Amino acid sequence: MHELSEDDFNQRVDHVQDLIEHAVDACDLDLDMEQVEGSLILRLGDGSRVVIGRQPASREIWLATPGATLHFGYQPGEGWTCDSDGELLGDVLGGVLGELVGDQVELDIDEQ
């Protein structure tokens, strides 16, 4: 994992959360979004929640879904990658949202 300063980490998380908001808006999904204490919370019509939260101490983004919590570290040239399998945050989040809404969701949020 690439070591980020706290300021760089927070700027990158702010940026990717902004990208997520715009990408989700473009998909026209039935959900509400709100920022709460550095986390982006997506609330779906059926009550399900997905939380994209920052973990400054470990310099990770944690993706909390109804079934699991996944950890993502920043990799230069790739973006936010899952610690367990190296999958990109946008692909994982798109898959999670797709399963929850019952349709394919593609989010182009990964930094290059």
Image: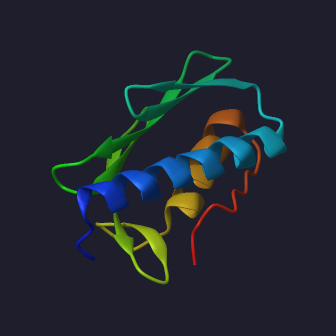
Instruction: From the viewer's perspective, tell me whether residue 57 is left or right of residue 107.
Output: left
Instruction: Please tell me in which quadrant of the rendered image residue 63 appears.
Output: top left
Farthest-out residue, left: 57
Instruction: From the viewer's perspective, tell me whether residue 10 is left or right of residue 48.
Output: left
In this orientation, does residue 93 appear? Answer: yes
Residue 110 position (above or below residue 19): below
The residue positioned 33% from the left and 44% from the top of the image is 54
The way the protein has been coloured in the rendering is rainbow
Residue 50 position (above or below residue 91): above
The residue positioned 24% from the left and 64% from the top of the image is 5
Residue 16 or 42: which is nearer the viewer? 16
Residue 68, given in percent of the width and then of the height, sits at: 35, 42
Residue 10, given in percent of the width and then of the height, sits at: 37, 51
Instruction: Please tell me in which quadrant of the rendered image residue 34 appears.
Output: top right
Residue 28 position (above or below residue 77): above
Farthest-out residue, bottom: 77
Q: How many marks?
A: 0
> What is the quadrant of the C terminus in the image?
bottom right
Residue 90 position (above or below residue 40): below
Residue 87, given in percent of the width and then of the height, sits at: 46, 70
Instruction: From the viewer's perspective, tell me whether residue 69 is left or right of residue 96.
Output: left
Instruction: Please tell me in which quadrant of the rendered image residue 84 appears.
Output: bottom left
Residue 81 or 48: which is nearer the viewer? 81
> What is the quadrant of the N terminus in the image?
bottom left
Residue 20, given in percent of the width and then of the height, sits at: 62, 48
In this orientation, does residue 71 appear? Answer: no
Instruction: From the viewer's perspective, tell me whether residue 93 is left or right of residue 3.
Output: right
The residue positioned 72% from the left and 39% from the top of the image is 102
